[in-house]
Image (spheres, rainbow, N blue to C red):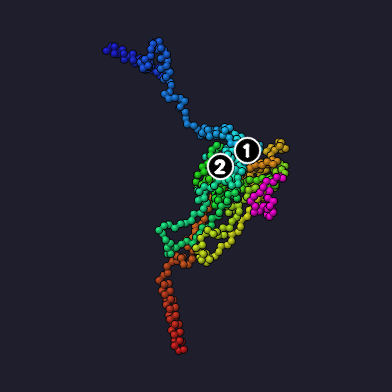
Amino acid sequence: MASETMIQNAKAFLLQESPDSKLNLYDHLCSIMHKILENRTPNAVDLLENLSKEVKTNKFVPAADASTDVSPASQEIELANVQNKLFEKPSEEAEPEPEDEVEMPLPDLMDTAHYFELAGVGLGREETFRIFPALKNLVDTHTLQSVRFWGKVLGNNKNYIVAEVEYREGAEDEPSTEEEQEDEPKEDEPEEGKEDEDDVPKPDYKPPPVIPKEENGTGCNKKTYFVCNEPGTEWVKLPPVTPAQLVCARQIKKFFTGNLEAPVVSYPPFPGTEINYLRAQIARISAGTNISPVDYYKFEEDDEDDSDGEGRDSFVENVEFEPLRVQELIDPSLSNWVHHVQHILPQGRCVWVNPAVKTETEDFEDEEEEEEREEPDEPVPETGPPLLNPISEDTEVDSMPAWSAGLTSNLVPQYAAAVLRSNLWPGAFVFGLDKKFENLYIGWGHKYTAENYSPPAPPTTQEEYPSGAEVTEVPDPTVDEERALQAVQQEQLDREAEEADMEDDDEEDD
């Protein structure tokens, strides 16, 4: 019993933990003996100190490899891995041999960004330089005639980098079948097994005619636009804009989310998703803010009519253009700058169409009914400012001019450039110096309003039936009123009977 007690006391002594390492000698010795017996270490007595140190060191080494214990990559690292591909130089073998010398459709973005930087406008050199090779990739994957960095539309979650392109003649991508189906109005088809019944009342209401969209390369769809969230990500082609989308976009005000498939919840309901709303806002901003120095563009000499530009939709670059002085470009009258994008009419088109004109595809089954109805008044054609109209005629914004002009530097005005800022579309800028000018937009895609935005009121409720004496409810007559009415009706009947008898007697006498 005494020996067992001594053994228990000795074991308890060895199990005491060190306050520094939190280890005990008993477990340490057991680990050393286990290692010696497992590996059959020769000359263990000579290596006892080294074995003790190795066992103690292994206590602090994690079981797994430290190099594999890495947290998942952040969004910044993933984006950096994507953007690294923008700066990879293709191998000499992969580079195609140029067959014909074709003019580069992409201008020097860093040069134009330099002038905007002088005015304190832009995205910074680093981001602009990342956008430059991203636009180069767009040129390499599509047959384009011109490419321009249109700007950046800000969103709550992600932003949109916008590129404005123009395809070479005959090289435009074919529209997808989904876009064609959306553009074509759906006709009501009768369900199988159901026949039209004559006793079922049919409403005489007919929806207003659908305003056709403008073809690609004309009007609001003259240019094509690609967007991406970050440089290096996939470019997405925006669909053509329709008049219904432009008309509705003027009545709503929504922030972008950065997701092209996100629904646009608004009143009035927007006919499409965020990709369509973005395209509509780009068209509105371009029509209102894309300007150029006067006489930089001119109409073709063949077009002798319409000298004021009304009815024209194209122009050419004036090779004989003489650049204006910077002081003339910032003249308060703003008569030396013109719009080179067509104005969008209230109808949602640049060229007005008569909705009352019927096409051959419309149904003429109810011609007789239509003849009986009164023909509606002929709509008044809509007109707007002509192409290359000076910006001095733009409407004022809350008692201030539509544009504000200034210099990039007032300290050395001899080397400064002219910069104009749109007060109607905050975020739209343009610079001009010698024969160089460029437009840029960086903003939320919203038009300036002096008051807070309020959605339009819903329309009045349609009347179910016309109000008149036939349907107006009146109080029930009393007994005396009913008897008096019956007496009057009886007297009328007696009088009619007497007149009939008198007529019969006259006929017998004759």
What number is the disc on residue 227? 2
Which quarter of the rendering shows the N terminus?
top left
Label 2: element kind: strand
467 or 78, which is in the foreground? 78
Q: CA distance from mark 1 to mark 2?
A: 17 Å
174 or 466, which is in the foreground? 174
Q: Residue at x 55, y 55 (%)?
A: 211
Residue contact at pointers 1 and 2, CB within 8 angstroms: no
* Mark 1 crowd level (few <14, some 14–19, many ≥20, 10 Å Cα): some
Residue 229, how many percent across, how many down?
54, 39
Q: Amino acid at mark 2?
A: Val
**Residue wearing tag 1:** 109
Task: Residue 97: tell me if it is visible.
Answer: yes
Q: Amino acid at mark 1?
A: Leu
Q: Residue at x 47, y 31 (%)?
A: 72
Q: Which residues are magenta?
A: 298-321
Residue 66, how many percent across, how many down?
46, 25
What number is the disc on residue 151? none
Task: Residue 454: tell me if it is visible.
Answer: no
101 or 465, which is in the foreground? 101
Mark closer to the chain start, 1 or 2: 1
Would residue 128 appear left or right of 335 to someone viewing this image? left
Residue 383, how many percent across, how many down?
63, 55
